[in-house]
Image: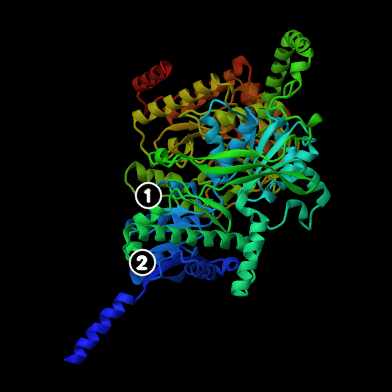
Amino acid sequence: MKQLYFWVLFYLIFVTIQKSVIRIGHLLPANPIIAYETDILKLCAKDLRERKILPANITLEVVTMESCRNFIGVANAAYLHHAYNVTVYFGPGCNEEMLVIGRLVSLWNVPIIAHMSGDDALADKTLFSTLGSIALTSATEMARATFTYLKLYNWEKIGVVRPTINFDRLSIHSLMDLVKNTNDMTINVVIEIDPYASADEIFETGKLTTLRNSARIIVVELGMDLNDCSNFMMAVLKAEMNNAEYVYILPWLSHIADYYPWEVLNSNKQQVKQAYQHAIVITAHGYDKKFVQDFGNKFSSETSLLASHYAMLVYMSLYDALFLYGLALRDAYDVTGNEQIYNNGTLIWKKMTNRQFLGMTGQVLTNNDAFRVPSYATYQITNGTLTIVVELEAKLGDPVKCSSKTDCSFYVPHEILTNYWSTANSELPLDIPPCGYDGSLCDNTVYILIGIVSLATVTIFAVGYLLYVKEQERRLHDMTWRIPRDSVRMLDLATARSRKSLDGISLCSMESKINSKLSVKQAICNGVKLSVRRFAQTRNITFMKSELQILKQLKMVENENLNKFYGICFNQKNELLILWVLVTRGSLEDVIFNEDMKLGRNFQVSFAKDVVKGIYFLHNSPLQYHGLLCLQNCLVDSNWTIKLSDFCTEIIIADKLLHNEIKKIHVEKDENDETHNISRSNSDDTFIFLSLICFNTISRSFVFAEYIQQAPEILRSLLQTNFLPHGSQAADMYALGMVLYQILFRMEPFSNFSLPKKKLLHKLANGVEEDYIRPAFPSAGHDPGFSLQLLKTIEVI
């Protein structure tokens, strides 16, 4: 029994004298350059203990886990909370994970302190209620410091140079918002520069000219580091815009490199130094090299380790972050006397607000949001040396008044050097030169220019008209109808037919029979099925202006009764392709003379109407006429609508054939095909070629059927010159009559004559009035009443 009492007493004494262990969650970024962050936290914890800032019964224990790699830091933060019950977090060093972890810790009532550059969105206390920041890199505070510097010299007109990407994470973004919300300052011009462009590329953009004509006080920020501005400053030097009239203010957010731009080994050091001459640099006072050197000595002596300049800057901020937590923890303990007060994250965070202490990065001052408000130093660069000219000291307002405000800090400028400008007599540069940005305020020629402009008005209108004509010429030569040959994939006949659906009954079965005879060459371009007219190209093809106008109009014209012209491939792969949208039911000839298909009167009326509507539209369009209207050029689409095709292109093809720019490709007879085999002869070479140019398919019974339907004047010119002449509306009306004849009677014209086809063409072309031959009208088998009704219907279309 005595032993039991002894152990109970020993346990109570042990519990009374044991120390409270506060576990610190350290999220170490996956960056080997700053691998010694854990040593820094331990060093700071040691200093807090030795300087007796923490209560004697409180011990800090650092638990480190990885972060900033595929969001592993978020998972590790949760693990540290549930497994180790950590009561404060330091890190991570990346904004993506901080935006997530910052929300989580506010739910856990655990403070988190950022020590590296952070997103301005972290200042939203509705989301990040227990988050503080000790980072020197603050875009918002840099913007406020820059604004204070501009106000110090009463500059009211400024220019801004920012990068084309990611500028919203720089201080220039916040500075523009500050200027917009004040009436004392205006941004005259905003220039965006590609941060990766060379000095020559920046100069050639002409943006420096815009800058010269708009501003003299220019804020330039193209990245986090001063080196990011080097190419722009070199371009400024090339443009001779680095004289005393200009002031370039360069916010330096983060000291990533430990050397100045003119110290880079692979650069023209003297030229870069000259480019930065007299520029103004604003940076956080905590980046002072003396602070870095002193902390580096302390770090090396305590840990026997060495680190880079950038790593030292990170370590200094991390040291100050834990030091701030220690001060807040001590204050909370002194107020409550509760040894477990470190579990109250909200109170600890509150004790981190509105306080000031001297840290490794100089004066550390936090505002109402527990965010650091750094003091800034303004330097002027002279011969590669930075000389401090103005200090921008951060201060807090009246604590009583600030308790009800979200932001109560401000900057007090202290001018260290006066009259440090490079102007004559060291006078302050003006934001607007006395003669204006372009010198126009001192130049009387402006009045002369007004008179010249008045006199030149007529000339301007004349030039405008000429430019309009030139623009029309340019558009004409744009060749929107030209199709790259590589985008056209030819289909063989078997493949094309295999794509047809043979399902259905009645008219659908008839359609399948028609489709089976469809021998037009086919292709696909950009998913569109096309019919192809293919010619071998013997030399480069050029188009006359009149032909270019026709092709442009062909590409633009659209009507439900006209087939769509898709384009032309030429001067590629030694061939010429004429491309029209494929109409799958074939030509009207295939339908009309298909003995297996029984067409009702409604179909005949519909076919006739469609042909008339199509030719009427062409005659009232800029194209004016078809040129070779025939039954074979009247195509039937899937909705049994007639679409006129091959209009106007036949003249162009005939011209190219005549001048031996193209040649017809031989079509060998297929043993399974019903079409005729076409070959060339010596005497009728051109004529045979021309006889083929209006076909999408070769007629099953003869190859000259389309010319029989043409007007005598067309045939005369064709037979005399072997060249297809330009058409006319009158010739189209003659051919229209022939087409309607075939629709009405389902007979081929002049089929009652037994003359050879070529001789028949001569007779039609050269006939005199008393010797005219005309198509025969059937005497039986047709309803004359229906024929008259059909003709009347066409007449009123």
Residue 40 coordinates in the image, percent (x, y): 54, 67
| Residue 332 vertical placement versus 662 (above, below) | below
- Can the viewer see residue 391 in this picture? yes
Element carrying mark 1: loop
Q: Is residue 673 left or right of residue 337?
A: right
Q: Quadrant of residue 7?
A: bottom left
What's the residue type where badge 2 is placed?
Answer: His
Residue 510 coordinates in the image, percent (x, y): 38, 44
Q: Residues within 10 Å of mark 2 (few under 14, many from 20)?
A: some
**Which of the marked residues, 2 or 1, is nearer the chain's N terminus?**
2
Q: State yes or no: discs 2 and 1 in contact (Cβ < 8 Å).
A: no
- Can the viewer see residue 579 in this picture? no
Q: Is residue 406 left or right of residue 546?
A: left
Residue position marked by numbered label 1 in the rendering: 127
Residue position marked by numbered label 2 in the rendering: 81
Q: Nearer the viewer, residue 236 or 320?
A: 320
Quadrant where the C terminus is found in the figure: top left
Q: Image point 30% across, 80% down: which residue?
A: 14
* Numbered mark located on residue 288 in the image: none
Q: CA distance from mark 2 to mark 1?
A: 19 Å
Q: Image point 68% across, 25% down: which residue?
A: 471
Q: Nearer the viewer, residue 453 or 690?
A: 453
Residue 200 coordinates in the image, percent (x, y): 76, 43
Q: Residues within 10 Å of mark 1 (few under 14, many from 20)?
A: some
Element carrying mark 2: helix
| Residue 293 vertical placement versus 566 (above, below) | below
